[in-house]
Amino acid sequence: MPLHVPPAPAPALRSVLAALGSPAAVHEAHTPALRALQGPMTAELPLPVHVLDRLHVSGLTAGGRPPRTRLTGWRFLIRSGDHYVAAADTRLTPDGWAFSHFFEGPYVAATERALRQAESLGKSYQPRLLSVPELYMLTLWLHGSVGADASSGLPAAADLLIPLAPAPPGIAAYRPHPVSELLPVLTHRLTPTASPIPPTMAAPAA
């Protein structure tokens, strides 16, 4: 079933299109593939980028609190011909949404692959990106509420997370995980292991 790609804020899209139309902005980008292109380029598939904050103290551990997400930007895939060659990030400034930077690398192809995979799952989702900075991890977040405000909201238990490559060791890239299954795994990885008490500090035997 088709994905319901949320509409990006108009100023965010305009800022990316302006950057694509600026030879200086393209030339200064650290994206050799983008600089080498001669034909037209388009900005497509806008995805809100959310960050999962302080996962290690989330409510998935005893005494913690529910995980929080915050919107940090909108990401657009840059198409040239039949291929996505780069991506453009925007950020929120005091004056509104503004172009941040172009980039290329594995996450561009990984995002495209995960989106194609999501389209074959047989259910409608609203695609987002969810970053877990503490694990240097980026996932495609498939939100079940397709009409929700894409700039806010928490991962629901039945939402799916598809880790993008490169994924952290021990976590399979491109394998869809329900949030209820993956978040406890990530939380466990970030939970400090209690150090054993030295014998000299242990309570004396009765």
Image (cartoon, rainbow, N blue to C red):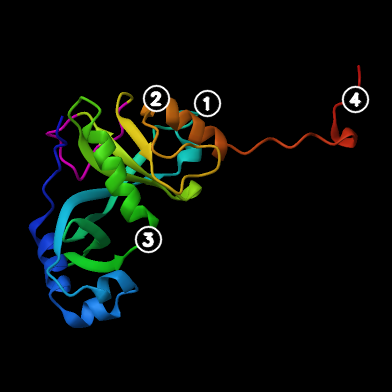
Q: Which mark is residue 62?
A: 1
* Residue furthest bottom in the image: 24
Indicate which disc, 3 or 4, sits on the residue closer to the N terminus. 3
Using a 10 Å C-alpha cutoff, classify the residue at mark 1 as few (fewer than 14 neighbours), some (14 to 19) or many (20 or more): few
Q: Which mark is residue 180?
A: 2
Indicate which disc, 2 or 4, sits on the residue closer to the N terminus. 2
Residue type at mark 3 is Gly
Per the image, label 1 sits on a secondary structure element best described as loop
Q: Position of residue 99 (x, y in %)?
A: 21, 67
Residue type at mark 4 is Pro
For residue 59, say whether it is visible: no
Q: Mark 2 or mark 4: which is in front?
A: 2
Viewed as shown, does residue 191 lie left or right of 37?
A: right
Near-viewer residue (42 or 91): 42
Q: Mark 3 or mark 1: which is in front?
A: 3
Q: Position of residue 26 (x, y in %)?
A: 23, 76
User: Which residue position holds label 3?
Assistant: 105
Instruction: Please tell me whether residue 177 is drawn above or below residue 95 in the rendered image.
Output: above
**Residue sitting at x 30%, y 24%:** 158
Cα distance in 3D space between marks 3 and 2: 30 Å
Q: Position of residue 115 (x, y in %)?
A: 25, 41
User: Is mark 2 in CB contact (under 8 Å) with mark 4?
Assistant: no
Q: Position of residue 75 (x, y in %)?
A: 24, 56
Viewed as shown, does residue 203 lie left or right of 69?
A: right
